[in-house]
Amino acid sequence: MTTTTPFHSQTILLVSDSAPVAQAMEQFIFNGLAMRVVARLHTFDNIEDAVCRFVPDVMIAYFMELGTERIEHIRRAAESAPHLKILVIASTMAISLVQEVFSAGAQGYLLDMPSREELLSALETMREQHIALDVRLRATVEGKRLLTIMI
């Protein structure tokens, strides 16, 4: 019988190219929850070191700009810690980039500035070993195809 980590006891590594966004996420989204933010990173050069040092259950990556370099950071984090669940938050609706995010090792993708409920729902979905995809993307034909491929 396998046991899963209770949702409320998960540890989180926040990675963001915007320090104010990472601070706001920690303060307003996780405040009052038993989930613990173990570290906040504002540069991406040391993602592997942070993942190995803090051993988080989840990495939430907020990117102002999503591109090849950022996707490579996701890949490096996923390769350095296979147990790690990765949720990416970015503003692009380009399905090809979103698909690359999942191919790099992410289990979730939300569009820019999700509500607290959307974020917590995505984390719960990922904890249950499912793919979390923003509802606005799921509503598109390409998003439905992507979900079909990922499931």
Image (cartoon, rainbow, N blue to C red):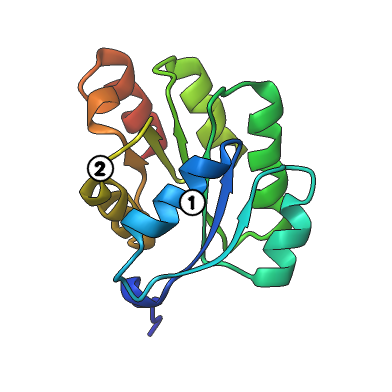
Q: Quadrant of the C terminus?
A: top left
Q: Which residue is mark 1?
A: 23
Please tell me how crowded label 2 is: few (under 14), some (14-19), or many (20+) other residues with Cα within 10 Å: few
Relative to 43, 119 lies left or right: left
Image height check: is 34 above or below 23? below
Task: Count numbered badges in the picture.
Answer: 2
Q: Which residue is mark 2?
A: 115
Q: Which residue type carries mark 1? A: Gln
Q: Quadrant of the N terminus?
A: bottom left
Disc 2 from disc 1: Cα separation: 15 Å
Q: Select label 2 or label 1 by which is in front.
A: 1
Please tell me how crowded label 1 is: few (under 14), some (14-19), or many (20+) other residues with Cα within 10 Å: some
Name which residue lies at 33% across and 15% down.
142
Please identify the quarter of the rendering in which residue 82 is found.
bottom right
Q: Locate residue 77, reporting x and y percent.
A: 68, 50
Q: Nearer the viewer, residue 117 or 135?
A: 117
Q: Nearer the viewer, residue 126 or 32?
A: 32
Q: Locate residue 74, reporting x and y percent.
A: 63, 41
Report helix, strand or loop for mark 1. Answer: helix
Residue 26 appears in the rendering: yes
Q: Which residue type carries mark 2? A: Ser
Name which residue lies at 54% across and 32% down.
63
Residue 87 appears in the rendering: no
